């Protein structure tokens, strides 16, 4: 049919275009481009196939990990690595966040559950000769003379089984349920596990449950229960970027933070991360005080960083080298755009070093670590807000919180503009136990700075707003709010509601 022919032509066109694309771009760019252009990602979103989207997102993370650990992150090298893993017997491992859902039963051995915790735990087979099990002797026993450890006294097998039972019980954060049955298919009825008896349970309690019809009632209630569609699970923690996304468009928030749809990167984000990483590494080395511990910047022995008695002495060439090393070479639309950003970055580096050489900033130390890229988890009401502070300086006893911006500077900051730094101020006061005197946006493209300090009233108002927004998220149906902001949305190419 003509419809089938159109699909074949479309597939052939995709293969042709992406064959060329694969020679020039990183694997993540190829993957996202194919998912969008093939219509597959749009198909999954329309179906709201959360499971497939989650698996796809995990594969995308696997690709990003490969790119971060490889000098040449090409498609050929990625496929070579995957094939080597498969040949070696590697089957891969799926992530599962039991806190965020979806609600499901995860079946595992007690040994496999070590180190994990779950809200509810069901411990099955709590009957005699199953738990504890009957002791089985090793097929090949080690001679006692070869065993260095002191052999414990008593019933060693029973002690080990009791320890394993304790491990299972302590996996439960809220409730634990023990199950047992009389009939497991054998001739004799099973007796209750001695561990259950040791915990105070008796056979007569099971008989009492039967007499009262509790088991039958529970069975009937389960049979009548209707299966509900899986709910939208909100993230366990929230961030400023999440709040901003929900404020712009609830559907955008759902795509980004609930369905976690893989998206194309942007040149501005690659460039912003480059500059953040550059200044983080530069200021970290510049502020290290241990002059005796000389080391070079990049692990190469042939280059040595000169160190003064007071602090590491880094010159402009060192900073440029850090910039080159941290350059993120992805998501630029073309060679011209990449060159423009690269030149802008070099100019920013020169301006930054010029200011640094005249007035070197003293980065504050918190818990014996320099306050650069400082993560925090801030409790607001019953919710947790996480974030990362770019930098905290200290000068003459006064503390300043600094956030880098690669966008255009603003002559006047609105209340919305101030919110990010206000959150950092609250985190500094409540978590780091410091009182900042200034909150500064440092606009790197022109070197301008905008500073202010939040009042108690502004901080309280922001806390109330954050709680209110998260409450709205919890009951939201995530309907789209199309408008001018659609032009800047990461999902404009796959959203049915986009306003063009």
Image (spheres, rainbow, N blue to C red):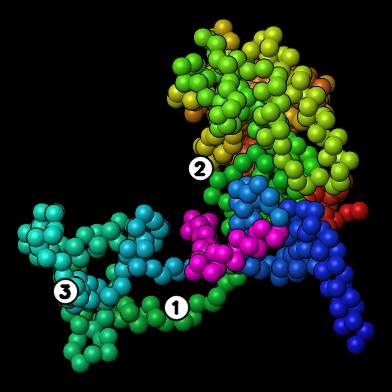
Q: Residue 494 location in percent, x, y?
A: 80, 60
Q: Which of 161 and 217 is in front in this view?
A: 161
Q: Which of marks 3 and 2 is in front?
A: 3
Whether 498 is among the magenta residues is no
Which type of secondary structure does the marked residue at label 3 adopt?
loop
Task: Say whether residue 105 is left or right of residue 282.
Answer: left
Which type of secondary structure does the marked residue at label 1 adopt?
helix
Residue at 20 percent across and 65 percent down: it is: 161
Q: Residue 363 location in percent, x, y?
A: 57, 18
Q: In this view, does 206 lie above or below 53?
A: below
Q: Which of 87 and 241 is in front in this view?
A: 87
State the image quarter where residue 222 is shown: bottom left
In terms of sequence position, does the residue under pointer 3 or pointer 1 come before the other? Answer: 3
Q: Residue 195 location in percent, x, y?
A: 18, 67
Residue 166 seen by the camera: yes
Residue at 56 percent across and 26 percent down: it is: 296
Write down the residue under mark 2: 382
- CB contact under 8 Å: marks 1 and 2: no
Write down the residue under mark 1: 222
Residue range corresponding to the magenta coloring: 75-103
In terms of sequence position, does the residue under pointer 1 or pointer 2 come before the other? Answer: 1
User: Which quadrant is the N terminus positioned in?
Assistant: bottom right
**Disc number at residue 75?**
none
State the image quarter where residue 139 is shown: bottom left
Furthest toward the top, the residue is 396
Task: Say whether residue 214 is left or right of residue 359.
Answer: left
Residue at 80 percent across and 34 percent down: it is: 342
State the image quarter where residue 130 is shown: bottom left
């Amino acid at each position: 049919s003509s419809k089938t022919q159109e699909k074949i032509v479309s597939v052939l066109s995709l293969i042709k275009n992406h064959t060329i694309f694969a020679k020039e771009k990183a694997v993540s760019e190829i993957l996202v481009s194919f998912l969008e252009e093939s219509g597959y990602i749009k198909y999954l979103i329309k179906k709201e196939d959360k499971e497939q989207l989650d698996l796809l997102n995990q594969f995308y993370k696997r690709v990003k990990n490969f790119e971060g650990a490889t000098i040449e992150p090409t498609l050929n090298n990625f496929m070579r690595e995957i094939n080597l893993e498969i040949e070696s017997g590697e089957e891969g491992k799926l992530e599962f966040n039991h806190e965020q859902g979806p609600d499901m039963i995860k079946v595992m051995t007690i040994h496999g559950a070590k180190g994990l915790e779950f809200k509810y735990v069901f411990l099955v087979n709590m009957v005699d000769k199953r738990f504890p099990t009957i002791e089985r002797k090793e097929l090949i026993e080690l001679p006692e003379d070869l065993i260095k450890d002191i052999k414990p006294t008593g019933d060693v097998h029973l002690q080990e089984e009791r320890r394993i039972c304790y491990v299972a019980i302590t996996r439960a954060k809220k409730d634990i349920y023990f199950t047992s049955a009389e009939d497991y298919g054998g001739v004799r009825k099973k007796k209750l596990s001695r561990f259950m008896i040791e915990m105070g349970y008796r056979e007569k309690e099971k008989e009492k449950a039967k007499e009262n019809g509790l088991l039958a009632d529970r069975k009937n209630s389960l049979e009548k229960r209707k299966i509900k569609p899986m709910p939208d699970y909100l993230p366990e923690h929230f961030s400023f970027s999440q709040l901003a996304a929900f404020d712009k468009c609830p559907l955008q928030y759902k795509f980004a933070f609930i369905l976690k749809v893989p998206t194309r990167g942007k040149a501005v984000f690659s460039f912003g991360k480059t500059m953040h990483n550059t200044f983080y590494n530069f200021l970290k080395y510049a502020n290290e005080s241990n002059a005796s511990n000389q080391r070079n910047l990049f692990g190469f022995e042939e280059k040595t960083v000169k160190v003064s008695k007071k602090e590491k002495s880094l010159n402009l060439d060192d900073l440029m080298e850090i910039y080159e090393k941290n350059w993120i070479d992805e998501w630029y639309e073309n060679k011209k755009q990449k060159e423009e950003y690269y030149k802008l970055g070099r100019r920013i580096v020169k301006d930054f070093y010029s200011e640094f050489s005249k007035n070197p900033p003293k980065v504050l130390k918190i818990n014996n670590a320099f306050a650069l890229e400082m993560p925090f988890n801030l409790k607001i009401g019953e919710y947790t807000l996480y974030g990362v502070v770019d930098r905290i300086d200290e000068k003459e006893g006064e503390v300043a919180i600094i956030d880098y911006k690669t966008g255009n500077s603003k002559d006047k900051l609105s209340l919305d503009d101030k919110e990010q730094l206000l959150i950092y101020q609250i985190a500094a006061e409540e978590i780091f136990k410091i009182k900042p005197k200034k909150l500064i946006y440092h606009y790197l493209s022109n070197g301008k700075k905008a500073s202010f300090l939040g009042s108690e009233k502004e901080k309280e108002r922001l806390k109330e707003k954050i709680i209110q927004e998260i409450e709205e998220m919890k009951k939201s149906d995530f309907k789209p709010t199309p408008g001018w902001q659609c032009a800047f949305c990461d999902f404009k190419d796959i959203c049915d509601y986009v306003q063009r």
